Image: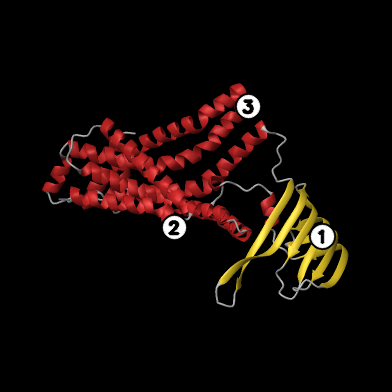
Amino acid sequence: MKAGNLQARFSNIPGLSLLDRYIFTELILPWLFGMGLFSSLGVAIGTLFDLVRRVTESGLPLTLALKILVLKMPEFIVLAFPMSMLLAALMAYSRLASDSEIIAFKSIGINAYRLVIPAVILSLVVTGLTYLFNDYVAPAASYEANAALTKALRPNRKAFIEDNIIYPEYGQIRQEDGSDRTVLRRLFYAERFNGERMEGLTILDRTQPEVNQIITSESAAWNIERNIWDFYNGTVYLIAPDGSYRNIVRFQHQQLALPSAPLDLAFRARSGTEMTLRQARDYLKILRLSGNPTRVRKLEVQIEQKIALPFVCLVFGLIGAAIGLRPQNANKATSFGICIVLIFAYYLLSFVTTSLGVAGALSPVMAAWLPNLLGLTAGGVLLSRSAR
């Protein structure tokens, strides 16, 4: 597509000045180039080489390998969006600076802050696209790809945990001094799970203050229609809080209002990259009940990263425009080199803050958003210097 055709298309958008249309024309072509480049590199390095090895060594069918390759592409397209925005801003504004067009704009009273507005607008548009891909397209496609690969290479692997399903549920109790203490409220154990029913169940229920229950049952199944458990052939032991005997109740069929979390835990949960934001938040509720703080913190950080990742496009767009505005004779190779260095530095910082967030040294919000905040600050400082 020629630059003249692009400019003609942008001229149809209301509210865009001639300057905005001109800079958009300079931005869009390198952005499209970056999308193709970074997406191809990501797919080749992250998936293609591994699939080729599995086709030759593990006998993975070629048609299935191609299907997995296509399903993996959205995962890398999400990462390509911000990288391409950085490359586009660097190349576009560096070209304007090297041809002295930035000096010409400033000579007629157009300052640097006005010149970066098209880059910011395009960055916000790309931010929206990144969010849509990252939350609606990439998780489902990645899950299907991993499921297809697992099924092909390990056909006998079950899609659920078969033995020893243990689910502890914790709660807070208020002590006499006013502080809260975490205690076990309910312990769910099943010896086996066949995909439909739990077998060999033992449940310790301490949720009632007046009495504790120990429930044993041969089997149990989740009743989807009523959102309740159906227990079969079991016994309920009622014990007073002081340990004294209360009663024994035997049953052939008993419905108990227990949470469905043990069933959710039995089915293998998706990884963070395979869940939408809503699915991740729903799963977080289950993890919080399990009393595993490390897994809870990790998922909390992943949830915040799902929100923060699209805004990397805005950060990169601002930084790229601010660097490109500085007077220099930067060619495309130099712009690409600066782009690679900045991408590496940003994701290295993101890796460090994520690790600190999982370890508990940073809050999940700070772990996910700190690189963006630092990037916006750096972009603002560079822009102010370019405006002088």
Determine whether the residue tagged by mark 2 lies in a helix, strand or loop.
Answer: helix
Is 276 located above or below residue 226 in the figure? above
* Kind of residue at badge 2: Val
In the current view of this chain or complex, which residue is farthest to the top? Answer: 56
Determine which residue is flagged by label 3.
Answer: 60
**Image quarter of residue 101:** top left
Residue 133, visible in the rendered structure: yes
Q: Which of marks 3 and 1 is in front?
A: 1
Among numbered discs 2 and 1, the one appearing first in the sequence: 1
Among numbered discs 3 and 1, the one appearing first in the sequence: 3
Percent coordinates x, y for residue 279 in the rendering? 58, 54
Residue 216: assigned label? 1
Residue 29, visible in the rendered structure: no
Q: Is residue 68 left or right of residue 201?
A: left
For the N terminus, give its image quadrant. Answer: top left
Instruction: Tell me the CA gap for discs 2 and 3.
Output: 41 Å
Instruction: Tell me the CA gap for discs 3 and 1.
Output: 45 Å
Percent coordinates x, y for residue 291 in the rendering? 61, 59
Mark 3 is surrounded, within 10 Å at the Cα level, by few (under 14), some (14 to 19) or many (20 or more) other residues, namely: some
Seen at 30% across and 33% down, the residue is 337
Q: Is residue 280 left or right of residue 93?
A: right
Percent coordinates x, y for residue 37 in the rendering? 39, 32
- Relative to the observer, which residue lies in front, 126 or 54? 54
